[in-house]
Amino acid sequence: MTIEFEHIDEIDSTNDELKRRAAAGRCREFLVLSAGTQTGGRGRSGHTWSSPPGSSISTSMILYPRDVESEYIPRITPLAAVAVAETIEDLYGLPVGIKWPNDVLISEKKVCGILNEMILDDDGRPDHVVVGIGVNVHIREFDPEIADIATSLDLEMEAAGRTEPTHCGRIIGDIWYHFAKHYEDFLRTKDLKSVLSYYNERLVNRGRMVRVLDPLGPFEGEALFADEAGALHVKTEDGERIIDSGEVSVRGIYGYV
Ligand code: BTN
């Protein structure tokens, strides 16, 4: 797979720009678009995502997984979380956690969010997928609503007593290099086998009580592990329940995690 990188100073959203280019039929697979800032960055569940100029990474890659059933596409997102975790650990040696399904944390605070969007063709099969990754790098202050649950690489480097500078370009390159390896495995297996032990070792929800906001009714239980399909196993009073990331969100009972 050949990855092509393009950087622009400002855009509404790197995910939206890749989707526009794909809709216009002019987007090569594995194009990575990164922006210095986004004016309309989007997060999961309709949230906005802030990308202050020169302080964070906003980067997206376009994929054309035409042989993959649409129900398997959400499995691509944890691959990206693993790629970000590997990059931070390899480059800076900071210990990284993953909050199911795909938030990347340091010191139990969110340093990276991932938005995976699938566009179907007229037959209801995946046409293209845009994987968007936002990493807080040089941000030192967060909006009050997220100040308790967000962090940045620079803040965490400082807390660890480290003085070397972080470098957005290097981080972006390494993230997509790691992601490409895992995506190739995924195309063969259609599951998360190749990253599962790494993912579960860093899964911060493990062994903790969580509240599952299931549309059929919320429930609580102890998070156990994620399986090869990316589903979270939760031990409840009535037995084990298996949670699919597309349908629900999971909150810690005693805090963010
Ligand atoms: C989340 O809510 O945790 C997901 C955040 C995803 C943000 C990234 S930044 C690059 C890409 N472009 C967007 O508009 N969103 C994603």
Image (tube, rainbow, N blue to C red):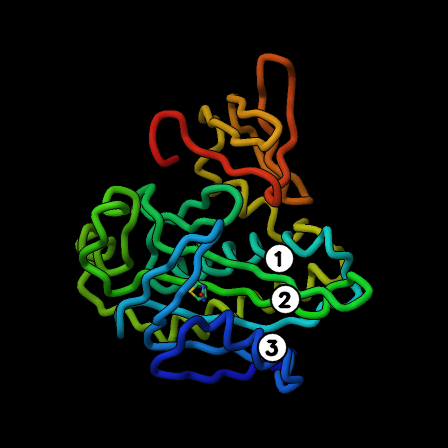
Label 3 or label 1, whichever comes before in sequence order: 3
| Nearer to us in this view, 13 or 98 | 13
| Nearer to us in this view, 249 or 201 | 249
From the viewer's perspective, is residue 173 above or below residue 133? below
Q: Mark 1 points at which residue?
A: 76
Q: Which marked residue is nearer to the observer: mark 3 or mark 2?
A: 2
Q: In this view, does 202 lie to the left or right of 30?
A: left
The alpha-carbon separation of the residues under discs 3 and 2 comes to: 10 Å
The alpha-carbon separation of the residues under discs 1 and 2 comes to: 9 Å
Question: Is disc 1 in contact with disc 2, using a CB cutoff of under 8 Å?
Answer: yes
Task: Please indicate, yes or no, whether residue 56 appears anywhere in the rendered image.
Answer: yes
Q: What element carries label 1?
A: helix
Q: In which quarter of the image is residue 51?
A: bottom left
Q: Name the residue under label 3.
A: 30
Q: What residue type is labelled 3?
A: Phe
Task: Please indicate, yes or no, whether residue 85 appears anywhere in the rendered image.
Answer: no
Residue 109: horizontal and vertical position, in percent? 32, 45
Q: Which quadrant of the figure contains the N terminus?
A: bottom right
- Residue drawn at x 22%, y 67% is 164
Q: Is residue 123 left or right of residue 201?
A: right
Q: What element carries label 2?
A: strand
Label 1 or label 2, whichever comes before in sequence order: 1
